[in-house]
Image (cartoon, helix red, strand yellow):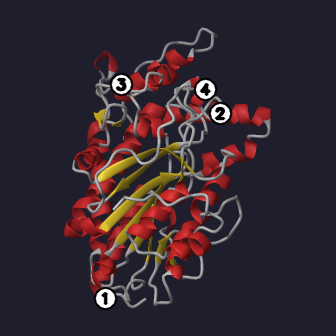
Amino acid sequence: MNAPPSSQISRRSLLQRAAGLGVTVSFLGGSAFAAADGAMARRKMVVVICRGGMDGLTVSPPVGDPDYAALRSAVAVSPDQALKLDGTFGLHPALSSVHALALGGQARIAPAIASPDRARSHFEAQDVLETGAAQVYGVNTGWLNRTLEAMGPSRIEGLSVGATAPLILRGKVQAASWSPGKGVDETARLPTLLQDLYKADPMMSRAFARGLETEAMAQAAMTALAPTPMPMPVSTGAAMTPQAAGKAMWQNAVNTQAPNGMTPTPPIANQRQGQEAARKLGSTLAGFMVQDGGPRIAAISLDGWDTHAGQVGQLNTRLTYLDALLDGLNSGLGQEWSNTVVVVATEFGRTARVNGTGGTDHGTGSTALVLGGGLRKGGIIGDWPTLKQEALFENRDVRPTLDMRGLFKGVLAEHMGVDRAALETTVFPDSAAAKPVTGLV
């Protein structure tokens, strides 16, 4: 690659920060838009994939829905905690920067979105999310790569962090790869993949579920980024009710005082360090994108959103880092924020009901975040189906009202100027039923 020295320094700095956080960052499109005229040549797009099944009912809690509190029990975000968006929805309190953007018309939510896949398998759902196909294993290239292909031949400079490029970026447009080795948490996705392998075996699946619960408790007790846990009651042999388990998990998540006068590890200070690292990663990525000849498209993959147990504490941390990353990206882009659209998506949502270990299981509809300085002000993207029992998908999940491909198609058409015919045939084949969302920018 023939990047100038300053680009190489920025690139190296970004990769080191990404490795430290266990984040995958990929670039494409350094010169893909060289032939574009005027303002279109400056348009940028960032896709953030939250792997594991991000819980939309926590990201954008529908606190005004009359059925929300009962379904979510002790893991629900209360109305006084939620950062208000409208009469129904708020944002999780960790998403304060996103909320500030939303108040300025620069962030919106799609609260009932899903890919065409309904299998609730990480393998299959991530394949459909990244390929943009109508069915699992329908194609073997990524829709973001095909987007650049559809925009015409050009010299493309690409870079992927990790041993291989993520599927969303694989295809005819080549990207170089760099592997940071042991600096990246290579085990972060292992539990979600093993769960798919074990789900057909009742004995193994139950044992694995218990293992996940134990692991969540161990992480909360031993890692510096987790809050200090409260003492747990000695088991009497009786099963803990979902309400009691959820309450215990919530108390552990919000507690910062050590019992009996003991000196706790400083979770808040350590979490702030991680938060600042995430913000720096976002600003470094932005700095690279605004350089002359810098990439116009970037993809970021965040692991760790599979919250079967101890969901409250895990998502408090994950959403804090996501918010910091987006804030760093916003501030780092400066004036170029007005030329940028960021989409945060996940492969599927979580169950509407809390489970017995203070978590939620694989679901269907989730929330996508859309951010950018050029967004049109508006309410939610898509329709809200409500959480009434008869409205739930298969009596368990948020019913999706928006096809994720329609959201991506809308951004690519209105913001990036991709030909609509190419969107239907090349980028998202067999997607005529997924109408592009209009009026976003």
Disc 2: CA contacts within 10 A as few (<14), some (14-19) or many (>=20): some
Q: Amino acid at mark 1?
A: Pro
Circle nearer the viewer, 3 or 1: 3
Circle nearer the viewer, 2 or 4: 4
Q: Residue at x 50, y 56 (%)?
A: 185
Residue 191 position (above or below residue 424) = above
Q: Quadrant of residue 264?
A: top left
For residue 190, say whether it is visible. yes
Q: Position of residue 13 (x, y in %)?
A: 32, 71
- Which is nearer the eye, 32 or 181? 32
Residue 177 position (above or below residue 307) = below
Q: Which residue is mark 4?
A: 390
Q: Quadrant of residue 29?
A: bottom left
Q: Amino acid at mark 2?
A: Ala
Q: Quadrant of residue 429?
A: bottom right
Identify the mark nearer the N-term, 3 or 1: 1
Q: Which residue is mark 2?
A: 209
- Which is nearer the eye, 143 or 420? 420
Identify the mark nearer the N-term, 2 or 3: 3
For residue 280, say whether it is visible. no
Question: Helix or strand or loop: what does disc 2 sit on?
Answer: helix
Q: Which residue is mark 3?
A: 78
Residue at mark 4 to residue at mark 3: CA–CA distance: 24 Å
Query: Is disc 2 in contact with disc 1, using a CB cutoff of under 8 Å?
Result: no
Query: Is disc 4 in contact with disc 3, using a CB cutoff of under 8 Å?
Result: no
Q: Which residue is mark 1?
A: 4
